Image: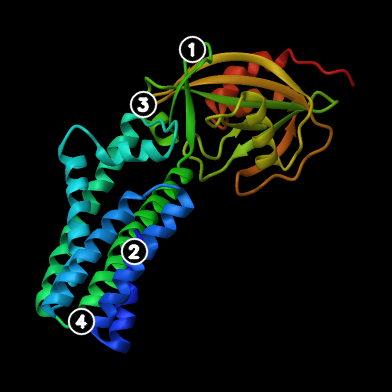
C-alpha cells in the first residue's frame, strides 16, 4: 500500500511549502510517474497503482477546478472503502477473497481449516480497525485542519495497523512461551506405540491415558545397586527411595534418549552402557504409565543434581526389603525387586 500513500505524503510536504494547488499538481504528476515506472519495471500495469493514479488524478483535478482540496482528502478514504469491501466480502461470504489473492501471489500455497480460521479472524479484526479509521478519516476530511487530516490519513493509519499486529505478536509470543513451558508427553498403547500427545498434567489426572516412563537401575562391579531418594518436591511419591534414574519420555523422544537425558539431569552422569530389562503397565489411582525398565553399569558414585534428587547411595540388594517393609520405597522399586535380585554383573 506504500506506493499509493506516497503521493499523499508528497502532497502534504508540497502543500506546506507551496500551498494546496501546487501540492495537488505535484501529487498528480507523481502518481502518473509512478504508473510509468512500474509499467517499465514490471512490464505490466499494476492494478493497484493504476487505480490509485486514476483516483488521485480525478480528485486532484476536481480539487484544482473547484479550488477545494476536499476531493483529494477523500481519496484515501475511497481507497480504504474499497479495501474494507474486499475484507467484508472475505469475512461474510464463503469465498475468502483475501486468501484467493494470496494464493495468486504465493504459488503452491497450501492451507488447512485451522489456518484459514485464524486468517478469517485476522481479516475480521482488520475490518473493524479499518472501519473505525475510515470514520475518523472522513470526519477529518470535512471538519478538521489539513495538518490533522494528514496525521489521520497516514500516521494514525500506521499506528492502528501496526498497533494491532504488535498486540497480536505479543499475544502469540506469550502463548508460544506458555506452550514451551508445558511439558508434552507421548500417549501410547499397551505395546508402547505412540498414538498421540498430552500435557504432563493431563497424563497425571486421567487413568485412561497411557504415557511412557523410563526407569534405570545402575549397578557397580560389586553388584551393589544405586538408589536415589526422590525429591521432596516431586508430585509422585516424594522422598521415597527409587531407581537410580526415573522420568518421563518427552514427546518426540525415544526411551534411550530419555534415559541419557534424565541421567545427565539427575545424576550429572554421561551414560553409555545400558540395556532393556522389562516392560509393564503401572496403574495408579489417577494415572496409567507404561514402565520401560533398563539396567546399566556405573563405577563410581556420581554427584547428583540436588534440585532433582534428595540423595543417592549404593545398597546391597538384600538391603532393599527392609526399606520396602518400612514404606520407604516407591511402588515401582517394590515391584521390580524380584527381577533385580537376579541381576549379576561380572566383577
1 vs 2, front mark: 2
Mark 2 element type: helix
Separation of disc 4 and disc 1 at Cα? 74 Å
Q: Residues within 10 Å of mark 2 (few under 14, many from 20)?
A: some
- Quadrant assignment, res 201: top left
Q: Is residue 144 above or below residue 313?
A: below
Q: Residues within 10 Å of mark 1 (few under 14, many from 20)?
A: some
Q: Is label 1 in contact with label 3 (beta carbons under 8 Å)?
A: no
| Image side of residue 83 versus residue 116, left or right | left
At horizontal 32% and vertical 40% (from top left) the residue drawn is: 101
Q: Can residue 235 be seen?
A: yes
The residue where tag 2 is placed is 32
Upstream in sequence: badge 4 or badge 1: 4
2 vs 4, front mark: 2
The residue where tag 4 is placed is 146
Upstream in sequence: badge 2 or badge 4: 2
Residue 294 spot, x, y in % from top left:
68, 21
Upstream in sequence: badge 1 or badge 3: 1
The residue where tag 3 is placed is 206
At horizontal 9% and vertical 79% (from top left) the residue drawn is: 143
Mark 1 element type: loop
The residue where tag 1 is placed is 190
4 vs 1, front mark: 4
Q: Is residue 31 above or below residue 22?
A: above
Q: Can residue 243 be seen?
A: no
Residue 23 spot, x, y in % from top left:
28, 79
Amino acid at each position: 500500500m506504500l506506493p499509493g500513500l506516497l503521493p499523499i505524503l508528497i502532497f502534504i510536504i508540497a502543500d506546506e511549502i507551496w500551498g494546496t494547488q501546487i501540492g495537488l499538481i505535484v501529487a498528480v504528476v507523481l502518481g502518473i510517474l509512478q504508473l510509468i515506472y512500474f509499467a517499465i519495471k514490471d512490464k505490466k500495469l499494476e492494478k493497484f497503482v493504476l487505480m490509485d493514479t486514476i483516483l488521485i488524478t480525478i480528485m486532484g483535478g476536481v480539487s484544482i477546478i473547484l479550488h477545494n482540496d476536499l476531493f483529494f482528502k477523500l481519496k484515501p478514504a475511497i481507497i480504504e472503502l474499497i479495501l474494507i469491501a474486499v475484507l467484508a466480502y472475505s469475512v461474510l461470504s464463503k469465498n475468502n477473497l483475501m486468501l484467493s489473492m494470496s494464493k495468486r501471489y504465493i504459488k503452491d500455497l497450501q492451507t488447512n481449516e485451522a489456518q484459514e480460521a485464524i486468517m478469517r479472524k485476522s481479516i475480521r479484526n482488520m475490518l473493524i480497525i479499518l472501519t473505525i479509521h475510515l470514520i475518523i478519516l472522513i470526519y477529518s476530511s470535512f471538519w478538521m485542519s489539513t495538518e490533522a487530516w494528514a496525521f489521520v490519513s497516514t500516521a494514525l493509519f500506521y499506528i492502528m495497523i501496526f498497533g494491532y499486529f504488535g498486540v497480536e505478536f505479543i499475544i502469540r509470543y506469550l502463548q508460544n512461551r506458555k506452550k514451551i513451558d508445558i511439558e508434552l508427553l507421548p500417549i501410547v498403547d499397551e505395546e508402547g506405540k505412540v498414538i498421540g500427545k498430552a500435557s504432563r498434567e493431563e497424563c497425571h489426572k486421567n487413568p485412561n491415558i497411557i504415557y511412557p516412563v523410563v526407569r534405570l537401575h545402575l549397578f557397580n562391579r560389586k553388584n551393589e545397586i544405586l538408589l536415589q531418594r526422590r525429591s521432596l518436591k516431586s508430585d509422585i511419591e516424594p522422598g521415597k527411595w527409587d531407581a537410580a534414574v526415573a522420568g518421563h519420555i518427552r514427546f518426540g523422544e525415544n526411551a534411550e534418549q530419555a534415559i541419557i537425558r534424565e541421567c545427565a539431569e539427575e545424576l550429572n552422569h554421561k551414560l553409555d552402557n545400558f540395556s532393556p530389562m522389562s516392560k509393564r503397565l503401572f496403574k495408579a489411582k489417577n494415572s496409567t504409565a507404561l514402565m520401560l525398565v533398563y539396567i546399566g553399569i556405573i563405577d563410581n558414585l556420581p554427584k547428583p543434581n540436588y534440585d532433582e534428587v534428595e540423595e543417592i547411595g549404593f545398597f546391597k540388594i538384600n538391603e532393599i526389603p527392609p526399606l520396602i517393609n518400612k514404606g520407604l520405597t516407591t511402588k515401582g522399586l517394590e515391584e521390580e525387586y524380584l527381577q533385580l535380585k537376579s541381576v549379576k554383573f561380572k566383577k
